[in-house]
Amino acid sequence: MEEQRIYVSINDAVKAVFGSGVTVAAKRGVSGGDINAASCAELSNGERVFIKSNRSKDVDFFVCESEGLEAIERTDTLRVPKVLAVGKDAQAGAFLMLAYVPSVHKNGDYWEALGEGLFAMHHADTKSLVPGGKYGFYKDNYIGARRQVNTPKDSWVDFFRECRLEPRVKETESYFDSDMRKRILTLFDRLDRWIAEPKVPSLLHGDLWGGNVLCGSDGSAWLIDPAAYVGAAEADLAMTELFGGFSGEFYRAYFARAGKEPGYEDRRELYNLYHLLNHLAMFGRSYYVSVERIVKRYTWL
């Protein structure tokens, strides 16, 4: 992958992308999630750009996000905002500049097209993304504010155990009593009872819930805020159901093309255990009950 250029300021990035005579004319705050500040910048040439910012030391967070967006864009399936620049500004801190995507009403086939597009993305070639293995990514990145391990593995079961569950359990182990620690070790030992190797490795969005899908100016779905890696397609699908689920049309369109593998409903919560552990690490004990319930479901002691 080509190394990302790091611009020294927002103005420097604007001039490099739009021309030396273009400047930021105005900027207003917009909704940008729990982690970053977000704004819409009006440029002197009439263009608008979307800017996410955080502490200067977090520039790698935005480099990784930009690389995830570009990996999805290269599949030529679902749309993502175009990455314009990454940098560190003396006032704004680390920033990611994206093409602005205005929102309109959904097209009539919005959900069906999202399901079909995700299926196509999950079947795009991934060989260039995981040198030295089938699953993972060419570098570690982030999910939310947490580092995400993407060490290449040839086994999906090994990858999910060693790069997804184990790091999060280590971060949250202070929440677990001796019974839960024993159950978690048992779960790790039994993981291949529940999870099989997928037919093909898939590029995943990695954090695919409703807040990370927006309706663009063309009325179709656009993906934002990826935690991209190569894994089992079911992990993305499971995440779509964690916080309320997508429309039924989405699932019908996806499974009409992919077919639903037997036992998906039994594996769904196991995949979502990773995200709940991540939320336990970021937001605290309110997520413990959900983690405990899933661990106990998959262990019989």
Image: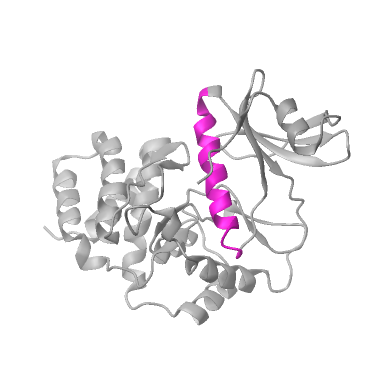
Question: Quadrant of the rendered structure where residue 272 is?
Answer: bottom left
Q: Residue 265, percent across and down?
A: 36, 70
Q: Give the range drawn in magenta.
A: 57-77
Relative depth, front residue between 265 and 140: 140
Q: Is residue 295 magenta?
A: no
Q: Residue 192, percent across and down?
A: 21, 64
Q: Residue furthest right?
A: 45
For image coordinates 50% across by 67% down, the residue present is: 124
Give the overall secondary structure of the magenta segment. helix
In the picture, measured across the screen, residue 43 lies left or right of residue 272, that is right
Q: Is residue 62 magenta?
A: yes
Q: In this view, does 156 lie above or below 228?
A: below
For image coordinates 83% across by 35% down, the residue present is: 43
- Tell me if I can see residue 104 in this picture: yes
Relative depth, front residue between 90 and 177: 90
Q: In this view, does 118 lie above or below 136?
A: below
Quarter in which the C terminus is drawn: bottom left
